[in-house]
Image (tube, rainbow, N blue to C red):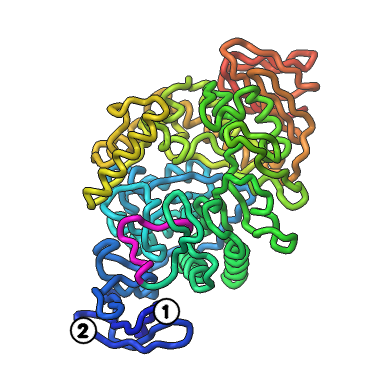
Amino acid sequence: MRYEVWAPSASQVTLHADGRAYPMRREDGGWWRRAAPGTDGTRYGFALDDGPALPDPRARRLPDGPDGLAAVLDPTLSVWRHDWPGRPLPGAVLYELHVGTFTRTGTFEAAAEHLPHLAQLGVTHIELMPVCPFPGTHGWGYDGVAPWAVHEPYGGPGGLVRFVDAAHALGLGVVLDVVHNHLGPSGNHLPAFGPYFTDRHHTPWGAAVNLGEPEVRAYFTNSALAWLRDYRLDGLRLDAIHALTPRAPFLPELSSAVDELSQSLSRPLFLIAESDLNDPLTTTPRSSGGHGLHAQWNDDFHHALHTALTGESQGYYADFAADPAQALAKILRGGFFHDGTYSSFRNRPHGHPLNPSTTPPYRLLAYTQTHDQIGNRAQGDRLSAHLSPGLLACAAALTLCSPFTPMLFMGEEWGARTPWQYFTDHPDPALAEAVRTGRRREFAAHGWPSDAIPDPQSPETRLRSCLDWDEPKREPHARLLAWYRRLIALRRATPALTDPDWSYTALSTDDRTVHFRRGPVHLAVNLSPQPAALALGGTAAIVAAWSPVAPPDGAGVLHLPPETAAVLLAT
């Protein structure tokens, strides 16, 4: 087989494969190549200028972790039992899932046992948090160092193939969260091979990825294409694109390559960006001067809804605290709250308005909870730790009946009481202590005593974060799960709820109520502990309600009990 590696600064490169050494030949562009024996499982690495053998930067498998040798992976040995035509993004309902805490076992195989639950819930796509190799056994995955490989403790490449195939058998698409903005810090050997990073720009994680170098852009683009092609994924979620410096031309190049692959495979593929820029160019088509990504997370929706539900006003919630219901109304009408408005959290104007002609609502993701919004709280506490089942039901209705693409975080659908905390498993004691100390210092600045911050390195922190699969069988969890199923079924069966148009027949709010209408569908939500009356402006029949709700009276007024949501169809 042919081995190759990009190492433009090396004077010599030696391939170490299956215990033997083979000098490599330098070719144009800083590439080194060599033919040598190798079959599936052959261990190999590259020694630069007589240094130690390092794993291949494009390793498809790292059976011994980020610091061990790579292993040859023969993709033709993958067994796919189910054809898959793909599932497009419009009309989707996503479900964010972390393999290591979805079950206590923490493997693809164990997670696959619960795929029927997700199919019955009605979601369309699973969004896996990062599965690239990282130090240790357990972690969030955002400190991965090998963007072509699969974390071995989860089940490695074979485990991912079987998981995706099992999901497809149930009609579920799979999206993968990938990290292009940083690697490591532990186990990152890329700097030894070439200029993968640049000191001209810095990110919260250190030197920026050198996206000004064409070979570095190609490294990440080809990695993305490999995930979509070889693992039959439906899409990728791009972590923190605002930390990609410089962003252009990487994002348009990536989106163009993915669109071309989609055409060649004859199935839909999409890219979802995480971005805090509120930049409409992210999802504006390339033909109109944008980056051409297919969707982006919308934190404004989360922040407005979270503030309305909890009353919290610290940090970035301060921008929404004055009137969260009105902030939510603005977002439902136009996508962003910060569209050039002043942000007190940032001390400057922020964002730009969307162009409704190039950005239909489904290009924005709406969510009540995510891994970040839970896990980056000091205690990793979910909304279910503080809110009544009624308010959780209201939050679900606002998210699942919004014009945006909804996304749930694992366990949200039954109001899971398990926290989701920040945990690591760094083998390096110095790095482990630095993470532990930094975490405590960060939250101490917000008034949390250090002994209240879970130790990220403690195995108990990860175990506390694992879902309890007995909860959905008990009340009040079972009732909330039934509500989520009902709302998702309504969304699937009611075209008005996924209409790509921004227009509303009606949209009104006050301090604790929200009422909007899209086509024949009314959503009425009362977040107050007191009853509320909403004028619907016509007759309508109730098709779903969290609590018993009487039909609108003769004047078209709906009387909602406290902390209740209702969906109605105009008659």
Residue 194 is one of the magenta-drawn residues? no
In this view, the residue farthest toward the top is 530
Which amino acid type corresponds to the residue marked 1 in the rendered image? Pro
In the rendered view, does 517 fall on the left or right side of 182? right
Q: Give the residue displayed 52% in from the left and 42% down from the top.
A: 122
Select label 2 or label 1 by which is in front.
1
The residue stretch that appears in magenta: 179-192
**Image position, residue 238 (x, y; %):** 52, 54
Q: Which mark is residue 141?
A: none
Tag 2 residue: 20
Q: Quadrant of the C terminus?
A: top right
Label 2 amino acid?
Arg
- Whether 187 is among the magenta residues is yes
Residue visible at 73% across and 24% down in the picture: 508
Extreme residue toward the left, this view = 19
Q: How many marks?
A: 2
Residue pointed to by mark 1: 8
Secondary structure under the numbered disc 2 in the rendered image = strand
What kind of element bears circle 1? loop
Q: Is residue 545 above or below residue 133?
A: above
